[in-house]
Amino acid sequence: MLPIMGESEFVLEVRGLKKTFGSGIFNRKSKGFTALRGIDLSVGRGQVFGLLGPNGAGKTTMVKILLDLVRGYEGEARVFGQPPSDPKTRRRVGYLPEAHRMPEYLSGWQVMVLFGMLAGHTKKEAEKTAAPLLEKVGMLKDCRRKVREYSKGMQQRLGLAQALVHRPDLVFLDEPTDGVDPIGRAKIREMVVDLKNSGSTIFINSHLLNEVEMICDQVVIINHGEILRQGTIEEMTPRTGITQFELRRDPGPLDILLSGLGTDLEQKGCRFKVKVTDEELDAIVDKLRAEKHTIADITRKRLTLEESFIDLVKEDRQ
């Protein structure tokens, strides 16, 4: 059992977390749908944590439990060492939902002031906080326009700004870069890094795995309500053993020169790749140099997070 305490070394903790949605009103014989099947998870302070999984994996259910938006679960959940229902805990949390809606008749500036006041700030305090946040997400020059005039990406950036208006210690971001252009995504990544550097913890649920790979410290992949794998980005994207070479000039066919070194040689002009051990890699470099070939680049290929994710989910479905 998780201890209840004033502060925990972990920002988030869940143990044996289970949640079943039933349809007992209309069909009392139904066992319902089990969204989570015993999740154990801990998130430390000052981390950017990625929650990944296909549609229906249980990601949103877990986030909503931690936000006290879903109740009636089994197991235990703690936020800053307290149950999610604790009001003092919730004041320290910011949230950007995936399908958020803001009053369309208000301007972006009015939205920020409104949410700041709802978070307990005076109007003056909310206005003082709003301007720098809007500038960081690139929305300051458009903040006097009505929300109804904003593109999806602009609304997403405004949504991020409002999630931070009360300076939360923990921020949940559900698909934060959905519909955002590359410049906007870069701004959001920059803000996430700034939040981490200031000591905040960021919990990201996203389908854009390349974005997650760039900014997350830890990730967990779940499917069918169960954890498939968790670890650092480096642990989740191991080396494949394949090394890619680029030479300054076309060396001609390399199958004879590299005979007995590595496997799965593939060559296209000045570029080739081969699966090798560390010792074989050293031997290939020596042979190329002995033949007076200049090596422009050597890259030891790793699995991308997306490749690792797809492999895990496919394996789980078999």
Image (tube, rainbow, N blue to C red):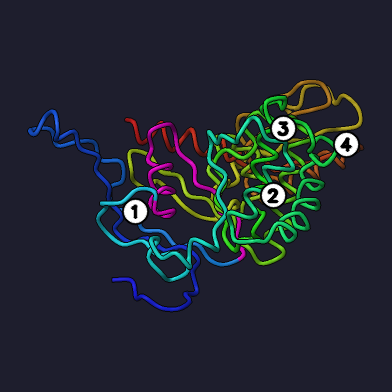
Residue visible at 67% across and 26% down in the picture: 148
Q: Which amino acid, by three-letter code, is at mark 4?
A: Glu
Alpha carbons under labels 2 and 4: distance apart: 69 Å
The magenta segment is 46-68
Q: Which mark is residue 39?
A: 1
Quarter location, residue 59? top left
Q: Are marks 2 and 4 in contact (CB under 8 Å)?
A: no
Q: Which amino acid, by three-letter code, is at mark 2?
A: Val
Q: Which amino acid, by three-letter code, is at mark 3?
A: Met
Vertical relation: 211 (above or below) 15: above
Alpha carbons under labels 1 and 2: distance apart: 38 Å
Disc nearer the start of the sequence (1/2): 1
Q: Nearer the viewer, residue 68 or 20?
A: 68
Disc nearest the viewer among 1 and 2: 2
Location of residue 271 in the rendering, given as x and y in whole percent from the top left corner: 79, 28
Tag 3's secondary structure? helix
Disc nearest the viewer among 4 and 3: 3
Residue matched to label 4: 291
Location of residue 306 in the rendering, given as x and y in whole percent from the top left corner: 56, 35
Vertical relation: 161 (above or below) 266: below
Disc nearest the viewer among 2 and 3: 2
Q: Position of 87 compared to 215: left or right?
A: left
Residue 50 on the magenta span: yes
Disc nearest the viewer among 1 and 4: 1
Location of residue 298 in the rendering, given as x and y in whole percent from the top left corner: 78, 41
Disc nearer the start of the sequence (3/1): 1
Q: Which amino acid, by three-letter code, is at mark 1?
A: Ile
